[in-house]
Each structure stands twice: as structure tokens, then as C-alpha cells.
Amino acid sequence: MTELSGPLLAPSGLKAATHIECQDNLEFMGALPSGSMKLIVTSPPYNIGKAYEKRTSLEDYVDSLHEVIAECVRLLHPEGSMCWEVGNHITRDGEVVPLDIILYPEFKRHGLQLRNRIIWHFGHGLHTTRRFSGRYETILWFTKRDDYTFNLDPVRVPSKYPNKRHFKGPHKGEISGNPLGKNPSDIWEIPNVKSNHVEKTIHPCQFPVELIERLVLSMTNPEDNVLDPYMGVGSALVAAIMHGRNGYGCDIVPEYVEIARERVRAYWNGTLRTRPMGKPVYDPCLPNGGH
Ligand SMILES: C[S@@+](CC[C@H](N)C(=O)[O-])C[C@H]1O[C@@H](n2cnc3c(N)ncnc32)[C@H](O)[C@@H]1O
């Protein structure tokens, strides 16, 4: 356990701890007990030549994930969820290889069941000239069993027509939708962390914290454990502790690990800035961008 481990009191009054190491994930996960993680959410290197990765053949890339996925399955709680977030691999001659489709059989081989293929749509990125610019990544959400934890109410979003009423039948005249809002669907529009984003650090591809908050709130209960085995700068851990869950994570790059620790410290001190969940996406057609 690091200096940031051990139970700390979250502002909500719920206990939440973090366990952060600068370590290879197989070594880190090997020390954790089977079935202990309610949510495993991660985004492995995409094999696209970012600063922290060595570009290899697609076969070697998939091979490198075999053991990590098997270890994640061992750690996953029977009622838990595994969320694997990836984009597309682009070959040297510009062919697009959808990594989630390539990786899907790796999860099925362990008997996991797909609950959603969530499309994370965002606005910023490089523009391409020989194909349409890529503006989404996917999250494959798997569970081990049918009786998985799923709490829809904490992640409902405002209904489009909240005053819509039944126009016939026994409930005629009554409000037809859920007063808490609607299901957010499997297409999520959440800004990615680019230069002007309040959460931006030196990491080239951080999760926006609000993306993970939605997973944490719907797939875990307070005091459950959340693991990111490719933690980067600890966005998943921040999302976990913000809601009174325990965060576990490791990365092999010391600078990223230090930033993850700083972000957790800043959260406890009340100085961490995150983009609030549910804040409307900037819309240039609206006054003040709709904010
Ligand atoms: C796509 S990034 C994840 C970023 C993270 N989601 C965040 O919000 O910062 C992948 C991370 O995996 C780390 N990594 C690569 N190989 C690893 C390994 N064997 N064990 C642990 N971390 C590893 C890289 O250093 C990189 O930070």
C-alpha cells in the first residue's frame, strides 16, 4: 500500500481508499484476491505509437493482452462488470482495424456476457484527408453472470419531454416518463480531454472523469472496489473515490503514477478540478456555447 492507501474519509462521509503502484499490471494484479473487484475499467495501449507504447504487429498486440484479460477475469467479482475501452488501430497503410471487434473473442472465451457496446462520441481530434475523421471510441461492457449490479437511477439524464403524458388508457393524463429522467442510452457524448479541458495533464489520452463516473455509479455500490490495470494518471481512481468507492491502479510510467497520486491528494484537499457530470457539451450555435 502506498501513502495514499488505507481508508480515508470521503467528503460524503463514506469510506474510500486508494491503492496505487508504479508496477507492471500482471505483478500488481497477482497480489490482489480473486473476485475482489466490482468494476474493472480500463483502456489499454492502443498500439498506435503513443509515447508510452511500442508499436507491434496486431497479433503480438492481442497476445500481449491474453494474460492481462485472464487476470482481470480472475479478479472480477461474480456480480461485477468489466469495461474495456478502445479505439481503432490504424495500420501503416491507413487501414482501420476496430480493436473492440478484434478483442471481443478474448472475453467470450472466458464466458463473459456482453451487456452493451457503448459508443463514446467526442468532438476533438486530428482531421484526416483520406477517410472521415475518427470521433468515437467504444466501451465493451461485460459481466460474469446475469445477476450483475446495475443502478440506473443515479445516471439518468434529463428527459427530452419531461411533461409528456399518457394520452389514453388507465394512466391517461399522467406523466408518462420517469421523473428522475431517462436512460442515458448506449451512445455517450462526453468531451475528450484535449488541451483546454480542465482535467488535462501530460498524459496523451486520459479518460474524462465523467465518463468513468457514469460507470462507477451504475455498476458499483458505495465501498465497492474499482480497478484500472492501465491506470495512466488515475482518472478511474478519481471517479471511484469521488463516489465513495475504493480505487486500485498501476502504471509503469513513474511520471503518470506521480500525477495520479497528486490528483487523488488534490481531490481529498478539495482542489481537484473535474468537468461536472451532465454539463452540456459546448454548442457554438447557442449563446455562450449553451453553458
Ligand atoms: C491508454 S493509457 C490509459 C490512460 C488512463 N485511462 C488515464 O485516464 O490516464 C494506457 C496506459 O497503460 C500504461 N501501461 C502500458 N503497459 C502497462 C503495463 N504492462 N502495466 C501497467 N500499465 C501499463 C501506459 O503507461 C499508459 O499510461
Image (cartoon, grey):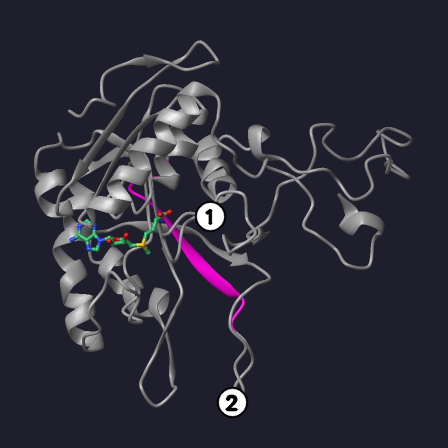
Q: Nearer the viewer, residue 120 or 150?
A: 120
- Residue beneath disc 2: 130
- Note whether ligand 1 is within 8 Å of mark 1: no
Name the amino acid type tagged 2. Arg
Q: What stretch is highlighted in magenta?
A: 134-146
Image quadrant assignment for residue 175: top right
Q: Which residue in the structure is indicated by mark 1?
A: 200
x%, y% of residue 31?
8, 33
* Magenta-span inclusion, residue 142: yes
Residue 214 in picture, x, y percent from top left = 50, 38
Query: Could you tell me how many numbered marks the image carries?
Result: 2
Q: Which of 135 and 138 is in front in this view?
A: 135
Ligand 1 under 8 Å from disc 2 Cβ: no
State which quadrant residue 47 falls in: bottom left
User: Residue 169 got which mark?
Assistant: none
Q: Main secondary structure of the magenta part?
A: strand
Q: In which quarter of the image is residue 105?
A: bottom left
**Quick one: SS at disc 2?**
loop
Q: Would residue 150 be seen by someone viewing this image from the given angle? A: no
Question: What residue is shown at x 25% (from left), y 23% (from top)?
Answer: 4
**Residue at the image point whose x is 57% and y is 59% from the top:** 122
- The quadrant in which the C terminus is found is top right
The crowding category of the residue bearing disc 2, from other C-alpha atoms within 10 Å (few below 14, some 14 to 19, many at least 20), is few
In this orientation, which residue lies closer to the viewer: 254 or 211?
A: 254
